[in-house]
Image: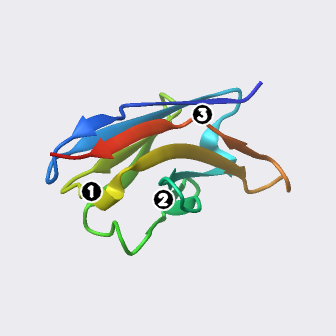
Amino acid sequence: QVQLVESGGGLVQPGGSLRLSCAASGFTGSTYAMSWYRQAPGKERELVAVIVDADGSTHYADSVKGRFTISRDNAKNTVYLRMNKLKSEDTAVYYCHALNLVVAGQAYWGQGTQVTVSS
């Protein structure tokens, strides 16, 4: 059974930092693209960052480039999102997502973790 469990969310002041973690179980990450999405109240879910293990490539939404860093620890089967210089507009529920790059239609979501940026 595949599970993605996020942690690390919370309340932080503007300009502060947080690190989100996504612990994966039930699969190994080598054939998966791991992503972070976020959804703010009243808005659609949007892609924040992606990392592909096969070649180590990463992709970021323009709104977080230079502030957020996605990384993975394959030994722990965990993906991280380091968020620096946080802004109020980063407030959202952050979701971890796993997409199988080999088998079509296999994708999984975590339950989400709340990030609130406020003074």
Name the residue that disc number 1 marks.
Answer: 88
Q: CA distance from mark 2 to mark 3?
A: 25 Å
Q: Is residue 55 visible?
A: no
Image x and y of residue 66, in percent: 26, 68
* Residue 59 % position (x, y): 47, 68
Q: From what the image shows, is residue 106 above or below residue 24?
A: below
Q: Secondary structure at mark 3?
A: loop
Residue at position x 70%, y 51% from top?
99
Decide which of tag 2 and tag 1 comes sooner along the chain.
Answer: 2
Q: Residues within 10 Å of mark 3 (few under 14, many from 20)?
A: some
Image quarter in which the N terminus is found: top right
Position of residue 87 relative to residue 13, above or below, is below
Q: Which residue is mark 2?
A: 56
- Mark 2: few, some, or many residues within 10 Å (few <14, many ≥20)? few
Q: Is residue 97 left or right of residue 116?
A: right
Q: Quadrant of the C terminus?
A: top left
Where residue 45 appears, as percent x and y from the top left, is: 58, 58
| Residue 78 left/right relative to 90 | right
Between disc 2 and disc 1, the foreground one is 1
> Residue at image x 65%, y 35%?
28
Determine the image quadrant of residue 64. Answer: bottom left
Residue 31 coordinates in the image, percent (x, y): 69, 49
Q: CA distance from mark 2 to mark 1?
A: 30 Å
* Vertical comparison of 19 with 92: above or below: above
The amino acid pointed to by label 3 is Gln
Disc on res. 111:
3
